[in-house]
Amino acid sequence: MIAVLKAGTTDKQIENLSAWIRSQGLDVHLSKGSVHTVLGLVGDTAKIDAELLESLDIVDSVKRISEPFKSANRKFHPDDSIITVGNTTVGGKDFAIMAGPCSVESEEQVMEIARAVKAAGATMLRGGAFKPRTSPYDFQGLKADGIELLLKAKKETGLPIVTEIMNANHLPLFEEVDVIQVGARNMQNFELLKELGRTQKPILLKRGLANTLKELLMSAEYIMAGGNENVILCERGIRTFETYTRNTLDLSSVPLLHELTHLPVIIDPSHATGVARLVKPMALAAAACGANGLMIEVHNDPAHALCDGAQSLTPDAFADVTAAVSKVLDAVKGL
């Protein structure tokens, strides 16, 4: 249930109404937008008389929300959320570009790539320290040493870092990580999501390879229900019957998610296609359809990458993509 308050409602009035709602055993989610102030009532709202609430002088309207996701719902938070990450932001009018190797392999490799992607316009450095792999015999990442190398690259370039967590027990290693990524395989690892909800770090939540948008938003709800509202959604392709690409990139998810939620939405064209030459057209399409950013894999020697070389761009190819994306963003601005 949400209560839309009238213009001119004072902070004291909001505080008094919120206190009464909490006395009924509910939580209150306050959203002050550019036009309206919205109080979201979270919990068993059956005990609340909607007509009584609507009759209050400061209440403009009361609506019940049928969707199971509440905190992530745009009805609770009409304005776009803007997530602050170090010296940059994700959401609103800003366009984030996260780039770097699928897996951190060595100091020389990650430093070279970090310098190159920053020069080409990346706003964050992504890199895998812990790598979930389909085969137990594949390279599993440098783990804690990989995070240390990412932090070294951050110190030199100033780029905030994004890296994936696989186990809540590893959280102490992520204290200096700017954005914690939850990979597709862990999208419904609810115990992990609960632990991340107790942090205040930005969480990049990837859609599972066979999950619906509703399920993605419910996973975001797990994080937000714990008190962490710094969630970035990522569409990285879903599994279909198509075999020419690694996955099928669902670009329709971008405008749909913008309708359903206030959370920013980015696109990962690298994992979506699995083919380096398809990354550019899909990145351009993502910029055109309203995505808030991109996550792109970049490697200085893709042919010898220890992980996902086939979908990784060279630094020069990445620079070509960012230049083209900038032109698309300029073209669609104001549409």
Image: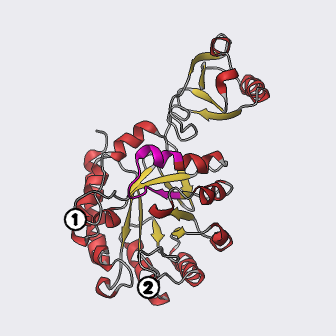
Q: Is residue 220 visible?
A: yes
Residue 244, percent across and down?
20, 66
Residue nearer the viewer, 255 or 27: 27
Report the disc number at residue 172. none
Residue 315, percent across and down?
32, 77
Going by the image, does 300 lie left or right of 103? left
Residue 85, percent across and down?
55, 59
* Quarter occupied by the N terminus: top right
Task: Say whether residue 205 is magenta.
Answer: yes
* Quarter occupied by the C terminus: top left
Q: Amino acid at mark 1?
A: Thr
Within 10 angstroms of label 2, few (less than 14), some, or many (20 or more) residues? few
Task: Say whether residue 113 is magenta.
Answer: no
Going by the image, does 102 lie left or right of 21? left
Q: Amino acid at mark 2?
A: Tyr
Residue 181, percent across and down?
52, 64
Classify 156 as above or below 161.
below
Residue nearer the viewer, 121 or 64: 64
Mark 1 or 2, nearer chain start = 2
Residue with the mark numbered 2: 137
- Residue 206, quarter of the rendered image: bottom left
Q: Residue at x 25, y 48 (%)?
A: 331
Number of numbered labels in the structure image: 2
Report the disc number at residue 243. 1
Highlighted magenta segment, given as a residue range: 204-218
Classify 138 as above or below 77.
below
